[in-house]
Image (cartoon, rainbow, N blue to C red):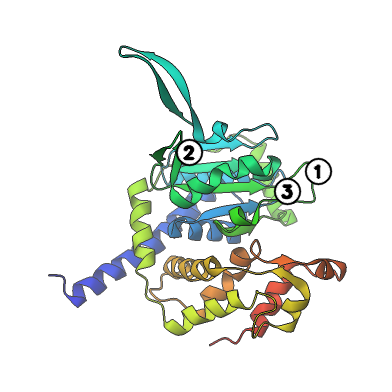
Amino acid sequence: MTTQTESYEAEQQAVEAIARAKTQIDEQLSQVIIGQKAVIQEMLIALLSGGHCLITGAPGLAKTLLIKSLAELFHLRFNRIQFTPDLMPADITGTEILEDTPEGRRMVFVKGPIFANMILADEINRTPPKTQAALLEAMQEHQVTAAGVRHKLEEPFFVLATQNPIEMEGTYPLPEAQLDRFMFNVVIDYLPEDDEVAVVQQTTSGRPAPLEPIFSGEDVLRFHEVVRKVPIAEDVVRYAVRIAKATRPHRAGSPEFVNEWVNWGAGTRAGQNLVLGGKARALLAGRSHVTPDDIRALAHPVLRHRVLVNYRAEAEGVGVEQVIDKLLETVPGL
């Protein structure tokens, strides 16, 4: 029977292991990715938590390179799906074909590119909603249904989707139901000049050395279990829930600026992701407890795709980032 002391020692070892993993990952990624420390941190939190990630940024900001590099580091089977206006759902999930066998002709399911550990859904908002929705079941249930038969996906399973800003020509806004399946919406911005100079020098001087895998799929699944076991005080959970609740307009206790500027607020998944992400962030920092600062640090990636501002906010030049900033100032902390 495991004693309380043994359990505590095991937890401390897990905390130290994840903190060391963060150092190894940073060292490896620095060979191919310059800057974007906050982006890498948020993506690692999503991976350790078992959540999917939406990555928003203009073309040419190394979104694809970053995701592919993470797959190499975690030694995960990686597939890239390029979303285009003519992409069909079966092109993602797979389809049944008629095949000749010794027993005669029969229908055989041919797996699509969704059957991998890490899926890069590249430019997901370049395809119509019908095809975007093909990812819904896979993201939520980790399975695909074809001709009434369920096909389980490999574990661990992550969808990391990139999208170009909505205002760019030829894009389709993602449905709210699908947006809510993403744990984070990570925004990649242009690099500072010095970092951009370093990128140009590095990418025009030769090919970088291939990354060495430092983890396995089993390691990732074990990290998921460790993250969920991190203790968190009820007051910190309540703080996360209050932040999510405050985004909902025309409810009891909703801030006046939310009633004026917000058309739709975050649901229960927002609070869940704030807490789960806070646990992973604490572990990456070498801590075995979650603080309100962990919750506040993740408010933007968790909420920016779940809060929909109205026409009044747009007319006044108020975006979702400003709404979240004001929420963090308004919702009482601990």
Q: Secondary structure at mark 2?
A: strand
Q: Tell me where residue 162 appears, x and y as whole percent.
A: 63, 47
Q: In terms of depth relative to the viewer, which is nearer, 193 or 86?
A: 86
Which class describes the residues within 10 Å of circle 1: few (<14), some (14-19), or many (20+)? Answer: few
Q: In terms of depth relative to the viewer, which is nearer, 65 or 103?
A: 103
Q: Quadrant of the N terminus?
A: bottom left
| Disc 2 residue type (three-letter) | Phe
Which residue is drawn at the image coordinates 38% and 73% (left, top)? 288
Residue under pointer 1:
169
Q: Are marks 2 and 3 in contact (CB under 8 Å)?
A: no
- Above-or-below relation of 197 to 203: below
Using the numbered discs, state the Cα–Cα distance from disc 3 to disc 1 in whole angstroms.
12 Å
Q: Tell me where residue 304 appears, x and y as whole percent.
A: 66, 64
| Disc 1 residue type (three-letter) | Glu
Residue furthest out toward the left: 1
Q: Is residue 223 left or right of residue 259?
A: left
Which class describes the residues within 10 Å of circle 3: few (<14), some (14-19), or many (20+)? Answer: some
Which residue is drawn at the image coordinates 45% and 65% (left, top)? 280
Q: Which mark is residue 58?
A: 3
Q: Tell me where residue 106 appears, x and y as whole percent.
A: 39, 19
